[in-house]
Amino acid sequence: ISVSDLVSESYQRIGAVEDQVKAFLTLDEERARQKAKELDAKLGTDESKGLLFGMPIGIKDNIVTNDLRTTCGSKILENFNPIYDATVINKLHAAETVTIGKLNMDEFAMGSSTENSGFQKTRNPWNLETVPGGSSGGSAASVAAGEVLFSLGSDTGGSIRQPAAFCGVVGLKPTYGRVSRFGLVAFASSLDQIGPITRTVEDNAYLLQAISGLDPNDSTSANVDVPNFAESLTGDVKGLRIAVPKEYLGEGVSEETRQSVMSALKVLEGLGATWDEVSLPHSKYGVATYYLLASSEASANLARFDGVRYGYRSPNAENLMELYKKTRSEGFGEEVKRRIMLGTFALSSGYYDAYYKKAQQVRTLIKKDFEDVFENYDVIVGPTTPTPAFKIGEKIDDPLTMYANDILTIPVNLAGVPGISVPAGLSSTGLPLGLQIIGKHFDESTVYRVAHAFE
Ligand code: GLN
């Protein structure tokens, strides 16, 4: 099969299902077909080929792409055409993938259902009445619907793993620092990571390989060797020590979800791994800590959208103060405004010690819980989400219920460790359930090794 055929198939599938799924915000068909032709010219020659030669890929729309509209799911960036590529995009060029288009998301990655997009609601391909999860809902839905083989998402509090779980695909949040954030529009800089969403664990390992590594343009990217991740897919989990936090199977977690984790543990036991129940005692403060810290960072990061530098500018302003106010009032959606107000409040003088500083201290305790468990165990296993995908509209008017959906993914971002979601059977309503596997800092290899046992 030629690259052009593969790319054609991708666009054909998009033509067939996109009316219903609505995963893409922008398609880049002309350039994709051109790129496919260039790559096809290499077929049958002995010219060296990239790691993901010819593979069609979709990109979450908060990752900047040169001369290709990048909206972050926000009206404020509706017509924003970046003039450079994110580091991960440069790395994909080197791996010779073909970018099919840009994928829908909750505005500025704030949300768990993709209903906060300023443009459209993406639907879950498993059941069009349910949400695909979020904020990388477009990234997960496009892979689940067969529109692309691979996609990139971003995960600040669960936005790769939760939609992957809801859509029955594989999604990994790398260790903080594993993948460059240069060109990822910042939401909460101390938590954000770009990561791969794929159909299989093997594909996931290859895509992570392609995008990982130290980047001089991102001072928080880590100078740590990038191992050959695919080499860890041996199927051998004998002797591995698995920790199962009791907090991850407690209140709010559905019985079916609990059962699916138990079955997964049986599989791993059968393969020679052992498991014990452990405790992550501070995890219960994860959601509160996260919403203070993430909103504080967001309020600072989003100050740049002022109608002066780039993006939307209100035509209704008479002076500079009005320009700021009207641009931001008209350009940002409800949830983004809520986070900016929350964050600005938490950082304001007189409140800083009570909220932001306190949250930082609790973050340290949450991180330490993970370190303590990892002294005796190789991985932590639990569900990705308390329940499978919920109905469109069900939680959108109740932000706190929406926030609670991330209770099992958020602590992983606060600790900075890697976590994957792999499909773990179906609910009685026929919706996918996700199993979460969490590893030590920079030990994605062991995470993949365990994940691969389910393929
Ligand atoms: N749902 C969480 C939030 O709304 C996490 C989002 C994310 O990981 N980008 O902040």
Image (tube, rainbow, N blue to C red):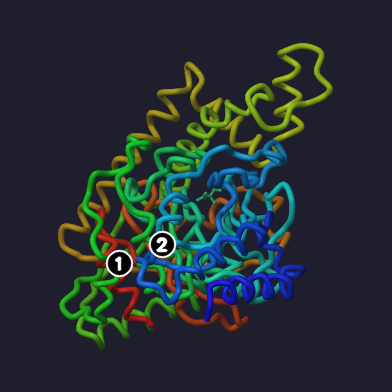
The tag on residue 447 is: 1
Where does the image place residue 118, in percent across and percent down from the top left?
A: 72, 47
- Name the amino acid, label 1: Val
Q: Residue at x 40, y 73 (%)?
A: 45
Residue 172 disc label: 2
Up the image or down, 442 lies above or below 253; here it is above
Q: Quadrant of residue 454?
A: bottom left
Q: Nearer the viewer, residue 47 or 224?
A: 47
User: From this viewpoint, is residue 345 visible?
Assistant: yes
Q: Is residue 124 above or below residue 270?
A: above
Q: Secondary structure at mark 2?
A: strand
Which residue is painted at 42% across and 67% down in the image? Answer: 52
Counting other residues with Cα less than 10 Å from the Cα at mark 2, is it few (<14), some (14-19), or many (20 or more)? many
Q: Is residue 262 left or right of residue 298?
A: left
Disc 1: residue Cβ within 8 A of ligand 1's nearest atom: no
Horizontal side, residue 442 vs residue 156: left or right: left
At label 2, the amino acid type is Leu
**Vertical order, 87 against 28 (above or below):** above
* Residue 333 in view, yes or no: no
Q: Position of residue 36 (x, y in %)?
A: 56, 66
Residue 258 percent across, percent down from the top left: 44, 75
Residue occupying the point 25% across, 53% down: 441
